[in-house]
Image (spheres, grey):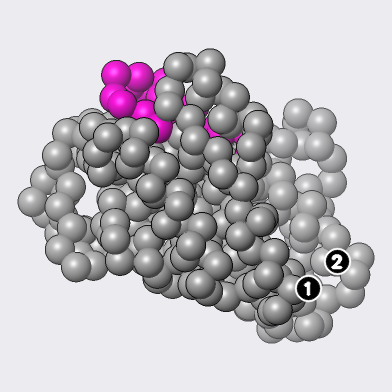
Amino acid sequence: MTIVCFVSGSGTNYERIVQRDPDHSYVVFTNRPDCEGVNKARANNHITIELSHLPYLKAARDRYGSMSVPRSCPERVRFEQDVWRLIEDRSEKAPDLICLAGYDQWLTDWTVDKYYPKILNIHPGDTAKGHSGLHWIPAAKAILAGDTEIRSTLFIVDKGEDTGPVLAQSRPLQIVPTLRALESEGTKGLVDGFEEVTGFAKKHTVSSYGDFEKSADAELKAVMKRICENLQSALKVAGDWELYPFVVHALLARGRVKVIDRTVYIDGRQMPDHGYRMDQELLE
């Protein structure tokens, strides 16, 4: 397979994918020249391509505001067209698989139309339950929904925000036992903070992150952020780093996945909305 990995930072997901099976043809693209991930790719003697998005988006940011540039504006499309021209020229073929491995830019509808369903992304939360959002927000949504566990989700990128069909989810990370384990390693106050947050949510009938943001004071918001940042760090190791290599090599590279429109089949069996879960019994 020719596997193209998009990275913007440390490239740890790319690392784990390669470690599981280094014998594919890997191409690594970054929009952040000289980031740690692309340096790791160079050390692996993989094809590396660097192109900053900043010159492309300067006019769009001036026009829309730095945080409001539309996902599929012409400037983003031109950037991605140039990116893919470079990638396909260097690899001399279209990719078999595209792995967003810590990439900090949206993909435009142009790219989705061109490569769906070959584009994968991983999310630190259960997208089948709507636990979307950046960084630690998915863990906060899970806590406020009353979930006792969190999972990483690997999905096919579509034109929405974390709305693509789910391929698979990681083994569950139990929230309270994980907080206790982190406390035993020296991160104090997590369990008490969790009880403070959940007690507030129960007392004020808060079950959504939006309601929590409106009703909690700054101190409680800081408690929630600290709890969830620690949970997300633990999930990255136990979830993301296990799930991504498994799906790429044990499922996709072995031809066990078929996607028809938005329906996912593994070994000929239609998957539920949450996809295949790694704690299910399925031969790897």
Query: Relative to residue 273, is residue 36 drawn left or right?
Result: right
Name which residue lies at 49% across and 35% down.
Answer: 49
Tell me the distance, in whole angstroms, between the alpha carbons under discs 2 and 1.
9 Å
Q: Position of residue 193 (x, y in %)?
A: 81, 56
Q: Position of residue 249 (x, y in %)?
A: 28, 32
Name which residue lies at 57% across and 57% down.
Answer: 105
Q: Residues within 10 Å of mark 1 (few under 14, many from 20)?
A: some
Question: Mark 1 sits on what residue?
Answer: 200
Of residue 41 and residue 168, the one placed in the foreground of this image is 41
Q: Quadrant of residue 22?
A: top left
Q: Pick out the residue farthest to the left.
A: 268
Q: Residues within 10 Å of mark 2 (few under 14, many from 20)?
A: some
Q: From the image, which quarter does the C terminus lie in? A: top left
Q: Quadrant of residue 181?
A: top right
Name which residue lies at 29% across and 56% down.
Answer: 115
* Residues under numbered marks 2 and 1 in contact, where contact means CB atoms less than 8 Å apart: yes
Query: Relative to residue 184, is residue 100 drawn left or right?
Result: left
Q: Secondary structure at mark 1?
A: helix
Q: Secondary structure at mark 2?
A: helix
Q: Earlier in the sequence, mark 2 or mark 1?
A: 1
Which label lies toward us, 2 or 1? 2
Q: Position of residue 205 (x, y in %)?
A: 69, 83
Give amino acid for label 2: Leu
Give amino acid for label 1: Phe
Question: Mark 2 sits on what residue?
Answer: 220
Q: Position of residue 164 (x, y in %)?
A: 36, 65
Q: Which residues are magenta?
A: 9-27
Q: Is residue 149 located in the magenta-colored stretch of the structure?
A: no
Q: Is residue 33 visible?
A: yes
Of residue 191 and residue 240, the one placed in the foreground of this image is 240
